[in-house]
C-alpha cells in the first residue's frame, strides 16, 4: 500500500552504495530528515544494500531501487524489501507491476507523451529526467497540461541553490544524486549535504 511520502519528497540516489557502507549512510540520511532512498541497480551489491537500508528505515521512510528496467527488477527489489520504484524511462509493464505490489512508482519522463503514458499505467510521481535537458521552461510548459496534483520530481544536476527555480516552474520534489552521494563519502559529509538539501527544500516549498 502506498502512503503519503510527499511531505519530504527528496529522493537520495545512492548509486554505487556498497552494502558495507549502507548502515552508516542510511542512518545519516534518515537522521537528516531524508525519507526516500534509492539504490540504482546498475552497480554491484545494490539489492543487498536495499535490504540493509529497508531493515533500518524508520516509520514513514521508503527504500527502493533505481534504474529498474524490467518486471524482474521490480520483483527482485520487492523481494529485497524495497517499496520504491524509480526508473529512468517510462515502461508501462514495469510501472503496473510496481503498482500491483503496492510500491511507490516514479518512472522517468521527459515529454508530455511519456508523462501521460506513465500516469495511465498508474505512476504516483513523475521523475523529470534528464532535468538539465528539460529545463525549468520545459517543466513549466509540461505542468500546464498535466493533472494539477501530479508530483513532478526533477532529477539530474539538482543543487540546493537551484531548487527554488525548479519549484517556481512546478517541481514538487527532487531526486538528488552526485551532489549528495558518491561512493566513499563519509557519513558526516552526507549528513551535512542532506541537511542543506532539506533546508533548501523547506525554504523553496514555503
Image: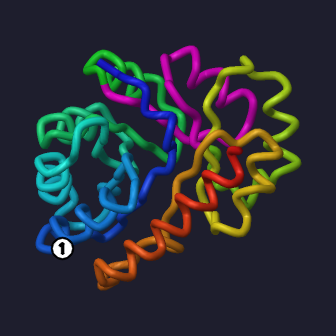
Image side of residue 41 versus residue 23, left or right: right
- Give whichever of 42, 146 is nearer the camera: 146
Say which quarter of the image contains residue 44: bottom left
In this rendering, position of residue 146 left or right of residue 7: right
- Badge 1 density bin: few <14, some 14–19, many ≥20, Cα 10 Å: some
Horizontal side of residue 113 vs 16, given as left or right: right
Residue 30's x, y, as percent? 31, 56
Dividing the picture into quadrants, the one containing residue 72 is: top left
Region of the chain picked out in magenta, as a range: 103-127
Please provide percent x and percent y for residue 157.
64, 67
User: Would residue 15 appear left or right of 194 to someone viewing this image?
Assistant: left
Q: Position of residue 139 (x, y in %)?
A: 79, 42
- Residue, x 39% and y 19% (percent of image)? 96
Task: Name which quarter of the figure residue 118 lies in.
Answer: top right
Against 147, residue 95 (above or below) is below
Instruction: Determine which residue is flagged by label 1.
Output: 21
Q: How many marks?
A: 1
Q: Secondary structure at mark 1?
A: loop
Does the magenta segment cover residue 164?
Answer: no
Q: Nearer the viewer, residue 197 or 151?
A: 197
Which percent across, then down, holds residue 53?
A: 19, 54
Q: Would residue 123 be counted in the magenta stretch?
A: yes
Image quadrant in which the N terminus is located: top left
Please tell me which residue is depicted at 75% across the width and 22% down the height of the picture: 146
User: Which residue occupies 61% across, 54% down?
Assistant: 201
Query: Which of the colour schemes (rainbow, by chain, secondary structure, one colour) is used?
Result: rainbow
Q: Is residue 23 above or below residue 150?
A: below
Depth check, front residue: 71 or 108: 108
What residue is rendered at 71% in x and 44% in y?
206
Amino acid at each position: 500500500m502506498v502512503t503519503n511520502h510527499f511531505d519530504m519528497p527528496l529522493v537520495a540516489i545512492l548509486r554505487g552504495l556498497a552494502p558495507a557502507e549502507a548502515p552508516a549512510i542510511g542512518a545519516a540520511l534518515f537522521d537528516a530528515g531524508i525519507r526516500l532512498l534509492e539504490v540504482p541497480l546498475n552497480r554491484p551489491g545494490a539489492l543487498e544494500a536495499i535490504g540493509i537500508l529497508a531493515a533500518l528505515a524508520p516509520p514513514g521512510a521508503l527504500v527502493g531501487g533505481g534504474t529498474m528496467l524490467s518486471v524482474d527488477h521490480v520483483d527482485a527489489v520487492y523481494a529485497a524489501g524495497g517499496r520504491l520504484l524509480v526508473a529512468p524511462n517510462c515502461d508501462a509493464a514495469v510501472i503496473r507491476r510496481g503498482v500491483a505490489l503496492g510500491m511507490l512508482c516514479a518512472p522517468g519522463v521527459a515529454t508530455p507523451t511519456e508523462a501521460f503514458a506513465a500516469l495511465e499505467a498508474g505512476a504516483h510521481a513523475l521523475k523529470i529526467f534528464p532535468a538539465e535537458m528539460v529545463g525549468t521552461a520545459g517543466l513549466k510548459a509540461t505542468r500546464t497540461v498535466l493533472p494539477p496534483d501530479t508530483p513532478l520530481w526533477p532529477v539530474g544536476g539538482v543543487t540546493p541553490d537551484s531548487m527554488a527555480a525548479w519549484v517556481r516552474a512546478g517541481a514538487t520534489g527532487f531526486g538528488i544524486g552526485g551532489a549528495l552521494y558518491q561512493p566513499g563519502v563519509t557519513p558526516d559529509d552526507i549528513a551535512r549535504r542532506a541537511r542543506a538539501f532539506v533546508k533548501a527544500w523547506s525554504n523553496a516549498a514555503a
